[in-house]
Amino acid sequence: MFLAFSLWILYGFGYEALFQRLTTQLEGAVVSSHDVHSPNNPRYVTEYVVRCPDGREATYVAGSSDASLPQSMPVGTTIRKRKWRVDYERDGQNISDFPIALYVLTLGAAVAGLVWSVRLWRQQRMAAKQYE
């Protein structure tokens, strides 16, 4: 049970939040923004169209988790998010709003729980073989 909980934490905090934030890359000016509400969910997402420096347009969807850049940025906002960084620039100002210490502590506890679970499972297997 503890193994499953540790894996769930690693997936939720590690992949769904931290990894997604780290791999997001976006640069340009917001040219369009609208909120999308789901009938079965009180939360919403914001869909942005961003004009990149090379002139092409990219779509970015900001959700309500730490993995996303902020929702409801006004049209004209310039955004620059580099891959493998958790901070970003908004209108030339560096924004560091990702709670990295919380994620490191949580993921550390999940890894410790995973190691502990595997060691316990191996000890139980060895004890079971000893009694055969």
Image (cartoon, helix red, strand yellow):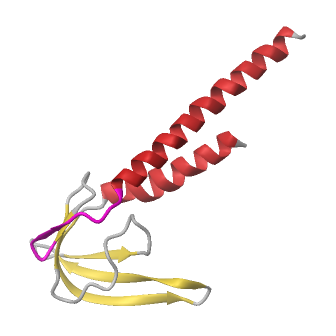
Q: Is 34 drawn above or below residue 29 in the view shown?
A: below
Quadrant that contains the C terminus: top right
Q: Is 108 drawn above or below residue 42 in the view shown?
A: above
Question: Going 64% across and 47% down the picture, which residue do you hit?
Answer: 5
* Rendered location of residue 64, percent (x, y): 44, 75
Q: Quadrant of residue 45?
A: bottom left
23 sits left or right of 40 in the view: left
Q: Quadrant of residue 25?
A: bottom left
* Rendered location of residue 20, percent (x, y): 38, 58
116 sits left or right of 90 in the view: right
Assign the magenta stretch its main secondary structure: loop
Question: Going 52% across and 37% down the picture, which residue do you hit?
Answer: 111
Q: Is 17 drawn above or below residue 74 in the view shown?
A: above
User: In front: 85, or 113?
Assistant: 113
* Rendered location of residue 2, percent (x, y): 68, 41
Q: What's drawn in magenta, residue-wise?
A: 90-99
The number of discs equals 0
Extreme residue toward the right, this view: 132
- Per the image, is 97 magenta? yes
* Rendered location of residue 63, percent (x, y): 42, 75
Question: Going 59% across and 36% down the picture, which residue do you hit?
Answer: 114
33 sits left or right of 56 in the view: right
Quadrant that contains the N terminus: top right
Q: Quadrant of residue 30?
A: bottom left
